[in-house]
């Protein structure tokens, strides 16, 4: 082989090698371009799917849901009304009639127990009292005289009288004897003898009376006389005590501490026995009288809360009256309320909780949608079996009946099942079969 041929062959071999190197480089560059292009296509597809998903998400409504569970009953607060009263209130009047001379209190004034409130005229009673006092003094003096007995001077005078009567009788008897002799001799008439005989009989009677009086004075006062005089004194003392009571009743006193609520009369008015003059209401001690249906009385505990004028006060049950009011058909419950500054007669409200047994589900009021035939509708959501994404949910309609309503929730029963996922709000925008997603 010639040198020329050898060079030509070497040139061909070198050319092939350069072409193979360029081909290899071109293949590498082409492979890289294909990979970049593929990645770009994948990125475009991902972006397209993301945009499609976002568009799909924008068309599917988000809903707020909650899982419901059954309950066996509910509590109902029943409010019963009554009124606040003072523990004691009295229409005050005098036990006896008369003219009102002074009233020392005004309406709204606070008074203490035993304080004088009003006065009646006492002139007539005071005059009677003075007369009875004078009679009592006389009777007591007479009793002292009876208890002391006769004086010695009176006894001596009685003895002298007896002696004088005896002497006169002796003289008359002597004169009678003389005239008897003269009459027998016919010297005097029968009349002269009769006169002296009558005189003797009279003197004998007077002597007997003087002797009895002397004996009575010597014996002293009889116990019956002293007892009778003592009874007379006791009667006068009783009359005096009665007048003292009547005088004390001419003053009207406060039977308890309280406040004058009403003044019925003024000075100068003549009132009768028992006629109301003032109305007194006790302060610091209040009670509430509330009517409760008989079937709910067993729910009344010893400690309660009473609402008065928008404010709640603690209260203790004092008693439950044993009779049913014929008008309201309720039983009156008396409660001791610790309040101050509340006027008597204000409305009091007692709240009692009543447990109602009824199985159902509590749902928010925002979940209700009006149904047909007086029923209501709520919506539940379940997983959409046809959706490719598990986050997609299907709306289902459930018919329910309302058992009890409260401010923000209602108790219902119907086709709901325990564990159902309920649409809590926005139910007005939904229809059965609509696809939704959970609110993030």
Image (cartoon, grey):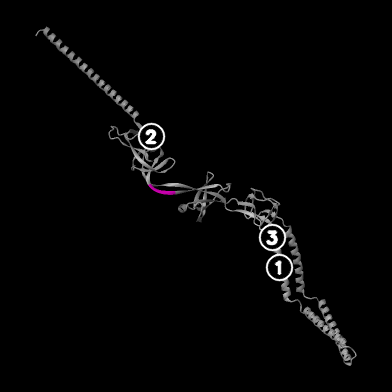
Question: Which residue is at the front of the view, 350 or 301?
Answer: 350
Sequence-wise first label, 3 or 2: 3
Residue occupying image coordinates x 71% and y 70% = 231
Question: Which residue is at the front of the view, 402 or 195?
Answer: 195
For the residues marked 3 and 2, what is the alpha-carbon distance in whole angstroms? 85 Å
The secondary element bearing badge 1 is classed as: helix
The secondary element bearing badge 2 is classed as: helix
Label 1 crowding class (10 Å Cα cut-off): few <14, some 14-19, many 20+? few
Q: In this figure, which residue is indicated by the disc labeled 2?
A: 428
Magenta residues, dominant SS class: strand
Sequence-wise first label, 3 or 1: 1
Label 3 crowding class (10 Å Cα cut-off): few <14, some 14-19, many 20+? some
Residue occupying image coordinates x 84% and y 84% = 198
Where 406 sits versus 119, above or below?
Answer: above
Mark sitting on residue 246: 3
Question: Which residue is at the front of the view, 308 or 294?
Answer: 294
Q: In this figure, which residue is indicated by the disc labeled 1?
A: 235
For the residues marked 2 and 1, what is the alpha-carbon distance in whole angstroms? 99 Å
Where 352 sits versus 408, above or below?
Answer: below
Magenta segment: does it hold 357?
A: yes
Describe residue 56's horizontal placement relative to residue 316 as left or right: left
Where 322 sits versus 372, above or below?
Answer: below
Magenta span: 354-358
User: Residue 372, image x and y in percent?
Assistant: 37, 39
- Quadrant in the picture for the C terminus: top left
Sequence-wise first label, 2 or 1: 1
């Amino acid at each position: 082989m010639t040198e020329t041929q050898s060079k030509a062959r070497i040139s061909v071999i070198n050319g092939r090698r350069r072409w193979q190197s360029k081909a290899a480089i071109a293949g590498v560059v082409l492979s890289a371009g294909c990979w970049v292009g593929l990645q770009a296509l994948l990125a475009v597809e991902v972006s397209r799917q993301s945009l499609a998903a976002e568009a799909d998400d924008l068309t599917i409504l988000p809903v707020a849901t909650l899982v419901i569970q059954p309950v066996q009953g509910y509590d109902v607060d029943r409010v019963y009304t009554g009124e606040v009263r003072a523990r004691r209130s009295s229409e005050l009047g005098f036990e006896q009639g008369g003219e009102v001379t002074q009233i020392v209190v005004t309406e709204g004034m606070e008074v203490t127990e035993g304080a004088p409130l009003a006065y009646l005229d006492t002139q007539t009673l005071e005059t009677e009292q003075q007369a009875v006092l004078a009679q009592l003094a006389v009777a007591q003096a007479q009793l002292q005289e009876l208890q002391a007995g006769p004086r010695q001077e009176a006894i001596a005078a009685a003895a002298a009288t007896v002696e004088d009567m005896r002497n006169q009788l002796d003289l008359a008897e002597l004169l009678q004897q003389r005239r008897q002799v003269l009459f027998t001799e016919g010297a005097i008439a029968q009349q002269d003898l009769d006169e002296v005989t009558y005189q003797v009989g009279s003197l004998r009677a007077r002597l007997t009376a003087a002797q009895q009086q002397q004996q009575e004075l010597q014996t002293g006062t009889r116990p019956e006389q002293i007892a009778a005089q003592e009874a007379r004194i006791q009667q006068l003392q009783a009359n005096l005590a009665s007048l003292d009571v009547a005088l004390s009743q001419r003053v009207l006193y406060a039977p308890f501490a309280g406040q004058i609520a009403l003044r019925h009369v003024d000075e100068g008015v003549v009132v009768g026995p028992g006629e109301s003059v003032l109305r007194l209401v006790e302060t610091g001690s209040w009670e509430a009288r509330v009517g409760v249906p008989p079937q709910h009385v067993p729910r009344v505990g010893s400690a309660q809360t009473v609402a008065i004028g928008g404010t709640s006060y603690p209260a203790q049950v004092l008693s439950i009256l044993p009779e049913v009011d014929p008008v309201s058909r309720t039983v009156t419950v008396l409660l001791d309320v610790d309040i101050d500054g509340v006027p008597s007669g204000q409305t009091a409200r007692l709240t009692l909780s009543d447990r109602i047994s009824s199985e159902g589900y509590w749902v928010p009021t925002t979940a209700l949608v009006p149904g047909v035939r007086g029923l209501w509708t709520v919506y539940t959501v379940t997983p959409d079996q046809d959706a490719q994404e598990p986050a997609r949910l299907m709306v289902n309609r459930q018919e329910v009946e309302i058992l009890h309503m409260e401010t923000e929730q209602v108790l219902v029963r119907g086709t709901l099942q325990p564990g159902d996922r309920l649409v809590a709000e926005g139910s007005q925008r939904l229809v059965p079969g609509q696809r939704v997603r959970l609110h993030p």
